[in-house]
Image (spheres, rainbow, N blue to C red):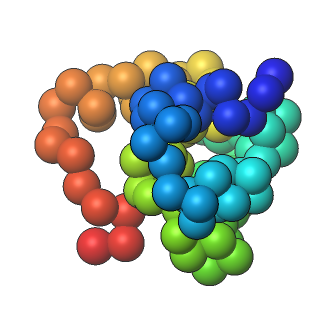
Amino acid sequence: MDKTRSISQYQDEENMSYSEKEALKQLPGDSGWPKFSVTGECDHMELIDYIDGLFIDVPSIPDYWITARLNIAFKGHASIWYTEMKEIHERRNWLG
């Protein structure tokens, strides 16, 4: 899957700045994301650390690029939980 195509659903590529296009190139493809399924004792920590690392490695990544891709990481019960939480809670900035 083309990484640019999956993100362009959320933002028109033609309107992206050069730095946004460069940041987009650094995002991993769908298979690069750790999976969170609520099956392990601490498998959520791997995902949290991974997202924190993305913001450190590529500080120009907008929050919505990450949150738009969370459905890739969540599987099974975690996916159901995430969908329900999106419906209940307002959007918030990942970093506070």
Q: Dividing the picture into quarters, in which one does residue 50 lie? A: bottom right
Left or right of residue 87, residue 36 in this image: right
Give the image location of residue 20, x and y in percent: 55, 58
Give the residue at x 15% y 43%.
90
User: Where's residue 71, x and y in %?
Assistant: 55, 29
Please name whichever residue, 70 or 9, is drawn nearer the observer in this view of the structure.
9
* Quarter-of-image position of residue 38: top right
Quadrant of the drawing holding the N terminus: top right
Is 35 situated left or right of 55 in this image? right
User: Foreground: 75 or 7?
Assistant: 7
Q: Position of residue 18 (x, y in %)?
A: 59, 60
Residue 82: image location, x then y, percent: 41, 31
Identify the residue at the far bottom of this view: 56
The residue that appears at 49% across and 24% down in the rendered structure is: 9
Residue drawn at 75 percent across, 52 percent down:
25
Q: Is residue 26 visible?
A: yes
In the rendered view, does 37 fall on the left or right side of 91?
right
The relative height of residue 77 versus residue 40 in the rendered view (above or below) is above
Instruction: Name which residue lies at 54% across and 30% down.
Output: 8
The answer to whether residue 34 is visible is no
**In the rendered view of the protein, which quadrant contains the C terminus?**
bottom left
**Relative height, residue 26 to residue 37 (above, below):** below
Number of numbered discs: 0
